[in-house]
Image: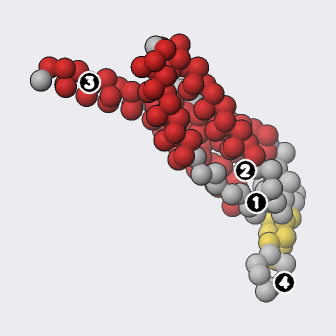
Amino acid sequence: MTPMALERTPGEAAVARSVDTARLIRCSVRCFWDGAIGAIPVIGLGLAAQALRLHERVRRETGATWRRPALFWYWIIGFGFTVAFDRLFGVAGMFSIFGIFLGLQSCEVWRSFSGAEQSFWNPGARHLRWGVVLAYAGYSGSMSLIGMMALGFAGIAFQSL
C-alpha cells in the first residue's frame, strides 16, 4: 500500500495523490552515490548532473519547496582567490583557499534545505541532501580545474609570443 500525500494549489482544495516510498528511497540513495562520484572534478560531471536531476524528481514528487542557492558568486570569487593564492603561495595556497570556498559553498547549499517544506516525508532525505552538496562540490572543482588549465594554457601561449 502506498502512502497518500495531499497536494495543494493556491485557491483549490487539497487533492490526495499516491507516493511510492520505495522509489523515493531508491532515488535518494542513487542521488547520494551519483553526487559522491560526481564530486570527482571533470570525470564526474555527468553523474553530478544526474544527481541534481534525481533531486529535482524527488522534490517534485514529494511536493517539497527548495530555494536554489546562488552559487555563481562563490564560483566567481572563489576562482579569483584561487588564482591569486596560486600566484602568491603556490599549490598549497591554491588548495587551501579552494577548500575554504568549497566549505562555504557546501554550507550555503546545506542551508538552502533548512526552510524546505514538503507534503510527504522522505526517509532518504539525508542522502538526497548529501548528494546535492557533493554534486555542487563536483561542479566547483570541475570549473576551477578547467579554469586553471585554461589560464595555464593561455600563459604558455603568451610566453611563446
Look at the numbered discs 3 and 1 and tell me whether their residues touch, using CB distance below 8 Å.
no
In the picture, measured across the screen, residue 158 lies left or right of residue 45, that is left
In the picture, measured across the screen, residue 25 lies left or right of residue 101, that is right
The amino acid type of the residue labelled 3 equals: Gly
Per the image, the residue denoted by label 1 is 64
The amino acid type of the residue labelled 4 equals: Ala
Residue count near mark 2 (Cα–Cα under 10 Å), binned few <14, some 14–19, many ≥20:
some
On residue 155, the disc is: 3
Residue 143 image point, x, y percent: 45, 35
Task: Label 4, secondary structure: give it.
Answer: loop
Task: Label 3, secondary structure: give it.
Answer: helix
In the rendered view, would you say 147 is above or below 159? below
Q: Nearer the viewer, residue 21 or 117?
A: 117
Mark sitting earlier along the chain (3/4): 4
The color scheme shown is secondary structure
Mark sitting earlier along the chain (3/1): 1
Per the image, the residue denoted by label 2 is 112
Q: CA distance from mark 4 to mark 2?
A: 29 Å
Residue 50 visible in the picture = no
Mark sitting earlier along the chain (4/2): 4
The residue depicted at 74 percent of the width and 61 percent of the height is 65
In the picture, measured across the screen, residue 73 lies left or right of residue 80, that is right
Mark sitting earlier along the chain (1/2): 1
Q: CA distance from mark 1 to mark 4?
A: 18 Å
